[in-house]
Image (spheres, grey):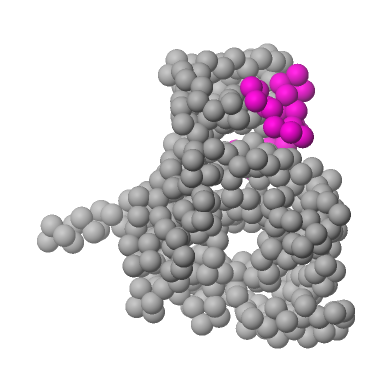
Amino acid sequence: MRYILIGCISLMLGAQARTDAPDPSDFAILPWGWLDWADEDAAETLEDLKACGFNLAGFVAPEDMDAVRAAGLQAFVRDSRVHAPVRNEELTEEEARTVAEAVTAPWLDDPAVFGYYLVDEPSARYAPNLGILAHAIQDAHPGAIPYVNLLPNYADTTSQLRAESYEAYLEAYAEALPSDYLSYDHYALIADGSLRGGYFENLESVRNVTLAHDMPFWNIVLSNRHFFYSDPTPAGLRFQAYTSLAYGARGISYFTYFSPGIGNYRLAPIDQFGNKTPTWDMLREVNLALHKLVPTYIGLKSINVFHQGNVPEGSKDESAAELVKELSWFPHIETRPEQTGAVVGEFLDEAGNPYAMVVNKNLHDDVRFDISFHEEGAVELISPYTGNPTNFSGEQKWLAAGQGMLLRVMK
């Protein structure tokens, strides 16, 4: 009886934690990769996924969509028939329409279908074909999202991007694809504790292009260890999520939820034996905070981003601040020059009220800070635990390593 009672309590707590998950159309929280389960474990796997704070189930084979639907989740359908047309020398609209209608026909009235997985990390040469196919998918299934994910800025321009520059690569896809969103990946947390160069430059490039095309963007970040990347840590997971928010992201994807059974992959939220790792709990904490912040965040318009302390190449320093009057930073310890200070995203709500997402760029140490705005009024923070505004005073003026805080002025 004791075991049953504990299980019931756990389910109740899990259900309570999931009630605040945002609609993925507003803000996507995606476990990047193929959803992997044994048939008898599907329901439990999806319940754990929801309890970890995800509102999408990843890329799912057609035969597994029944389980996604039963769990009350949505997913991207993964159908291999969409892959071949992308590599045609010249894809016609008629060919794309034929494939799109065949792939979407079984799912037109299925509430579990968020969209269709098309391709990951294509070069610029495939932009025209992917644009034709993506539009055909949307014509065949209105409201469904054709999923394409782009390369990071550390990809080789000649052999991988096949573009003159990274910005030209982004432009090719922003022009070709429907304007639902632009997704890219960038893995920046290195095993020696450093931050890969180009992380913020990538955010700058994607933000600039998507703002120009009036499209939201999603960022894919690390949630496992492999190659020369670092172990997942609370600070690293916070840093990746909150820096994405500072730049105006409308979706966050984690690579990966399941630990791949190859190479040196490890410490994803679920290991190769199907067990939860410490990363699962760390990631849940970040995702549940997003649940609380997103209802306020999605009503904001990104107008500016600046850096205080170390300013990455291509970024603005604090003299470029538009809404923030002064940001005072009181670090306890400074360990790495490239992680000095803050990144601040400035936002306005529909009524023109100022907001700022302030992020501690240090991956190792906490910091105390203070802030004032040009707009007069009391500064409040949006609680990541309740979603409600609260006083920005006393112990509220501390940021953990990698933590972000959403602040506003109350007129």
In-image side of 47 versus 184 (left or right): left
Q: How many marks?
A: 0
Residue 21, image x, y percentages: 50, 51
Q: Is residue 321 magenta?
A: yes
Tell me where residue 87 sits by quadrant.
bottom right
Quadrant in the picture for the C terminus: top right
Residue placed at 18% from the left, 61% from the top?
4
Q: Residue furthest left?
A: 1
What are the residue bounds of the magenta stretch? 296-323
Residue placed at 43% from the left, 19% from the top?
395
Residue 230, image x, y percentages: 48, 47
Residue placed at 68% from the left, 83% from the top?
81
Q: Is residue 386 above or below residue 115?
A: above
Residue 216, image x, y percentages: 72, 50
Any part of residue 67 in sight = yes
Q: Is residue 192 magenta?
A: no
Nearer-the-camera pick, 296 or 286: 286
Quadrant in the picture for the N terminus: bottom left
Q: Is residue 107 above or below residue 323?
A: below
Any part of residue 408 in sight = no
